[in-house]
Amino acid sequence: MKIVSVVNQKGGVAKTTTTANLGASLAFRGYRTLLIDLDPQANLTLGLGVEWDQLDCALHNVLLDPDETPLESVLVQIHDLPLFLAPGHLNLADCEVMLMPAAGRAYRLRNAIESLLEKQKFDWILIDCPPSLSTLTQNGIVASSHLLIPTEPKFYAFAGMDTLNRMIVGLTKDLRFKVELLGVLLTMVERGTRLHQTIAHEIRERFGDKVFETVIYKNVRLSESEVEGKPIILFDRRATGSQNYEALAEEVLARAAK
Amino acid sequence: MRQNRLSQRLKSKLDSFGFDALIKGVSTIVEETKPEELEALAGVPAVKEEKTASDFELVQEKPGPAPVRSSSASSRMYEAVGLLETIEVAKTAGRPIQPILSDRVRPAVAVRPAAPSAIKTTTFIETAEENPSQEASESKAAMRERDYESQDYESRVSAPEQLCRALEALSGRLTQEAGKMAASLAQGDVQDAGFYLAHINQILELLHTIDVRGDIARQLDVNNAPPPGRAWPRTAWTVVEFAESPFSALLPSNADDNLVRELIYAAWGISFEHK
């Protein structure tokens, strides 16, 4: 069982899209997969067709009072796949503030996941982290065994990863956790763009085999699938986006097996 | 040609970035990584510092994470003095109180070296963060808070024994530090007095974190609780704040502006030269 935080301090790099579609591709292959929407924007939740404002309770309840609202009590199954979602909610933003004075606040999610795993089995848990270096992101990282960093081949991507690097080093000073890089994923790549090629090359040079072979190309069908509230694999399996994420799932499984 | 230029520029800019912790992975579960190694991993050169709070004998701790607090004067003093973790509340109270700011940063401002009476105690961070599951259950009451006002108070009062011990310890320490500051001022040692003023401010900030209006302390009948209708004194990080603070009553009768300024500067860890 692997717990993977999909994380990048920079926004708009396809963290949510990657979490949803990688999770769906893994579930499609029979792996029981849990997606956790840690982002107060709750885009993962919306993108999978769950209306967060209609929910009685969501992830913020779990983080604030896990005894009253255990993680399993908020799970929603997605489209009859072995795919489950711990939905996010706008109130996660408040949760961030409320957790500030709490001791052990960075371990909330980890404790909730541990309790869940005592009762239910999952093969993969993917956590969609917010694009910030917040307590919520800390919760995601501390709960994870691996990090997956989606990044657009742009210069700012390096700055984002440098910041993430510093954040992780900072966390090691106070928190007990162990995490390794599952891989860096190049997303929103445009074919034939010289800048993208140059930066992608540089990323591969810096991160070596930590960069996934699979690349996620820009594909409008991915955005359309979000509107439909479905992962791309259920929306249009022949689309480039779907094929990219299926290839990524295979690569992730291969890396996990090593 | 253009691509080569682009690539070269990119490479030169990227040299200032670090990704080692990401690439190699990190673990603090099996063994602690040394701060110097962490700095190297972060790609941040170790900064040669003057004597800082970490040089205090009484501060037995690791350097903290990246700053989260605001850059206000008082928060910078949090960073500088590092008293948060040195107060004996953890030991006295038996277990750590919940609403403690546990974000620590490396001292940013140079401060005076060790106080004579070194206090070695378990830090809040160590106690709180190293026993997360225990803390998670213990802090349940605090987690029910929906804001920092009314409900916040209710939930905190729901653990009266723990709070009472914490408040007793803090207010006791406040009195001690005030006494030491008064003694130093009486002896004309403004540097020492500034050192104790920094402690006083730190304690007050802690008290404000737990019980800003003093209601809980009064309710729990804590020794030295503020009288009815009064809150804990405000911190005094500036000359004006100090002048308004009840601690200004501890100044000697011949105190002038320069002395107060020197006192405040000393609390900041900055030496003050008369012109």
Image (cartoon, coloured by chain):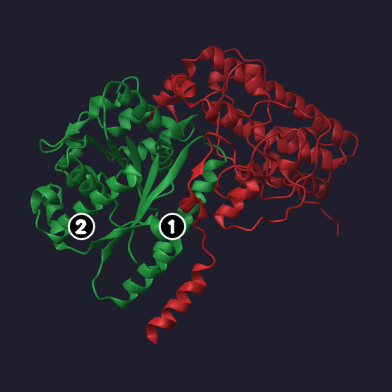
Chain colours: A green, B red
Q: Amino acid at mark 1?
A: Met
Does residue B155 sit above or below B7 in this rendering? above
Q: Nearer the viewer, residue A55 or B183?
A: A55
Location of residue A91 by image quarter: top left
> In this rendering, would A52 be left or right of B45?
left
Chain where mark 1 sits: A
Does residue B126 sit above or below B107 in this rendering? above
x, y percent for residue A115 = 34, 23
Chain where mark 2 sits: A
Residue name at image x 31 percent, y 25 percent: A116
Quadrant containing the C terminus of chain B in the rendered view: bottom right
Disc 1: which residue = A161
Whether residue A183 is visible here, answered yes or no, is yes
Q: Which mark is residue A239?
A: none
Q: Please tell me whether mark 1 sits on a helix, a strand or a loop.
A: helix
Location of residue B179 by image quarter: top right
Q: Nearer the viewer, residue A166 or B51?
A: A166
Does residue B192 sit above or below A189 in this rendering? above
x, y percent for residue B71 = 57, 50
Q: Amino acid at mark 2?
A: Asn
Other residues around mark 1 within 10 Å, as few (<14) / some (14–19) / many (≥20): many
Q: Nearer the viewer, residue B104 or B187?
A: B104
x, y percent for residue B86 = 68, 30
Residue name at image x 17 percent, y 63 percent: A219
Residue name at image x 25 percent, y 53 percent: A248
Q: Which mark is residue A244?
A: 2
Marks 2 and 1 sit apart, C-alpha to C-alpha, by 23 Å
